[in-house]
């Protein structure tokens, strides 16, 4: 990626791709969570064409350095350059892992103000995704992420108090949590039942 001074309106940052939305037959909107710029949306025209400079560089959970040019109005900017730093391929190794990683991303997108810098939230996501690259998805990871997010947003109860859990606090903030949560909890329950049954058989 080119260094030095960039043209007016062009900014350099790094972030995680948390969602991809089809914009047209060959174009896509890339939703980023960055530490320096918060939630950022960029459009890439012709992204799916074989000769596009972005071909193969845009996928969910990628951590990238990128240049984007701000639009004069609105919050949809233009992606100019990109260099993937971490592809996190392990997060697409099985459906449960992908679903939980996607839940983390969607929950952040629903609770964070657009283009409001917050390095702590970016780091929270990075740690959560790093965990899922090495460990299987589990209920404890989901609940821990919700509690940490609520704490960083300043809506959690005081440590050691008897206040609301992260889930309750987040519901109070946004009303409804992403639909994937119910599917995840159902999957975790089935795994726990299976492990419990397997343990009884082995006794």
Image (cartoon, helix red, strand yellow):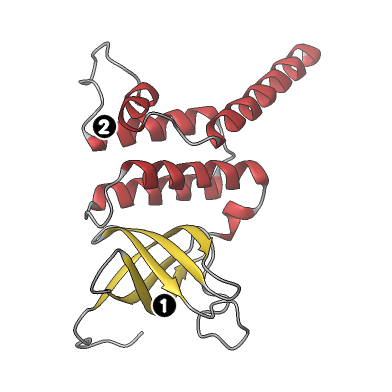
Q: CA gap, disc 1 to disc 2?
A: 32 Å
* Sequence-wise first label, 1 or 2: 1
Residue 51 disc label: none
Q: Residue at x 67, y 48 (%)?
A: 94
Direction from residue 64 to residue 164 in the image, left or right: left
Q: Which residue is mark 2?
A: 151
Image x and y of residue 163, in percent: 27, 14
Direction from residue 185 to residue 160 in the image, left or right: left
Q: Residue at x 58, y 26 (%)?
A: 185
Compared with residue 79, is residue 197 higher up or lower down, i.e. above or below?
Answer: above
Image x and y of residue 81, in percent: 39, 81
Compared with residue 158, is residue 183 higher up or lower down, i.e. above or below?
Answer: below
* Between 110 and 108, the one nearer to me in the picture: 110
Image x and y of residue 184, in percent: 59, 32
Image x and y of residue 78, in percent: 36, 76
Compared with residue 100, is residue 19 higher up or lower down, i.e. above or below?
Answer: below
The image quarter in which residue 77 lies = bottom left
Identify the image quadrant of the C terminus: top right
Q: Secondary structure at mark 1?
A: strand
Q: Which residue is mark 1?
A: 82
* Between 186 and 24, the one nearer to me in the picture: 24
Identify the image quadrant of the N terminus: bottom left
Q: Residue at x 41, y 77 (%)?
A: 82
Q: Secondary structure at mark 2?
A: helix
Q: Answer few, some or many: residues within 10 Å of disc 2's Cα (few below 14, many 20 plus, some between 14 and 19).
A: some
Compared with residue 140, is residue 5 higher up or lower down, i.e. above or below?
Answer: below
Q: Answer few, some or many: residues within 10 Å of disc 1's Cα (few below 14, many 20 plus, some between 14 and 19).
A: many
* Between 46 and 38, the one nearer to me in the picture: 46
- In the image as oriented, which residue stretches furthest toward the right? 201
């Amino acid at each position: 990626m080119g260094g030095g001074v960039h043209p007016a309106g062009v900014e350099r940052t790094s972030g995680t791709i948390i969602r991809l939305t089809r914009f047209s037959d060959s174009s896509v909107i890339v939703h980023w969570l960055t530490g320096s710029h918060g939630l950022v949306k960029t459009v890439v025209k012709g992204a799916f064409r074989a000769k596009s400079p972005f071909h193969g560089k845009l996928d969910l959970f990628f951590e990238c350095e990128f240049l984007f040019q701000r639009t004069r109005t609105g919050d949809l900017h233009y992606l100019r350059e990109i260099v993937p730093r971490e592809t996190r391929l392990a997060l697409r190794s099985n459906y449960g892992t992908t679903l939980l990683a996607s839940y983390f991303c969607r929950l952040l997108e629903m609770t964070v103000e657009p283009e409001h810098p917050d390095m702590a939230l970016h780091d929270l996501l990075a740690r959560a995704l790093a965990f899922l690259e090495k460990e299987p998805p589990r209920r404890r990871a989901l609940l821990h992420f919700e509690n940490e997010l609520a704490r960083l947003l300043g809506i959690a109860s005081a440590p050691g108090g008897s206040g609301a859990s992260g889930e309750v606090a987040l519901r109070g903030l946004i009303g409804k949590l992403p639909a994937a949560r119910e599917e995840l909890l159902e999957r975790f329950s089935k795994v726990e039942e299976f492990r419990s049954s397997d343990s009884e058989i082995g006794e």
